[in-house]
Amino acid sequence: MSIVTIMLLAAAVAAQPPKPVGTAGAWITPEDYPADALRERRVGTTVFRLRIDADGKPLHCEVIGSSGTAGLDEKACALVMERGRFTPARNGQGQPIEADWENKVHWQLPGADPFPPSDDLVEFDLDSEGRVSNCSALDVLAGRAMPDSCERLAKDVRTMVRPERPIHVRLRHSVEVEELPLDPKAPN
């Protein structure tokens, strides 16, 4: 690869990523829950990647982590494509450019516990160059593999850790919510 090509590729990298206009969490409401998924009591988390154009409009949506229900995944992409608006990404010269933006939609039944318990375990090897290998991801509570989680979680770790020698990484993320009585002296 020539130096010119490398410089052109570097110029295309976003110096400023795209930013949602308003609150992205308001783009999908409980009223948007697909009727069949609601009837079948389907829940899950759809992780998606949007390609945003230089005007801040979504061009394409790709599911990078399935909720386990095609209808929920399709609805998530359809809604963020329709409702999502962004301040476009900018390159190093401040010019608007196309770029990717990732987020997720937690599909939970109306009236359900907002913090369902979860226990995820991800393990991988990380070399001194930040390359990931031998990745496995498991939803411990459901007892199912989460292959889409490997690269996404490893990418996050690579931005934080650059080991001097190869290491094995084990990430365990658990959520357990306990309801406690309110402290009458605590401010509201």
Image (cartoon, rainbow, N blue to C red):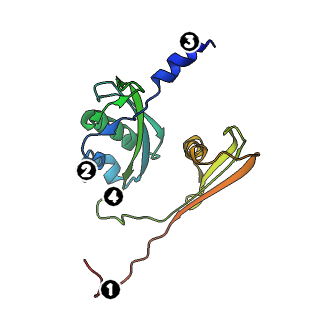
The residue mark sitting in front, 4 or 1, is: 1
Q: Amino acid at mark 2?
A: Thr
Label 4, label 1: how far apart the Cα atoms are: 29 Å
Looking at the rendered structure, the secondary structure element under dot 4 is loop
Q: Earlier in the sequence, mark 2 or mark 1?
A: 2
Question: Horizontal and vertical percent for residue 184?
Answer: 28, 87
Label 4, label 3: how far apart the Cα atoms are: 53 Å
Task: Say if mark 4 contacts mark 1, CB within 8 Å.
Answer: no
Q: Earlier in the sequence, mark 4 or mark 1?
A: 4
Q: Amino acid at mark 4?
A: Leu
Question: Horizontal and vertical percent for residue 166?
Answer: 76, 45
Question: Horizontal and vertical percent for residue 107?
Answer: 37, 52
Q: Earlier in the sequence, mark 2 or mark 4?
A: 2
**Which residue carries the number 2 mark?**
29
Question: Horizontal and vertical percent for residue 90?
Answer: 37, 29
**Which residue carries the number 3 mark?**
4
Dot 4: few (<14), some (14–19), or many (≥20) neighbours within 10 Å?
some
- Label disc, if present, on residue 183 of the rendered structure: 1
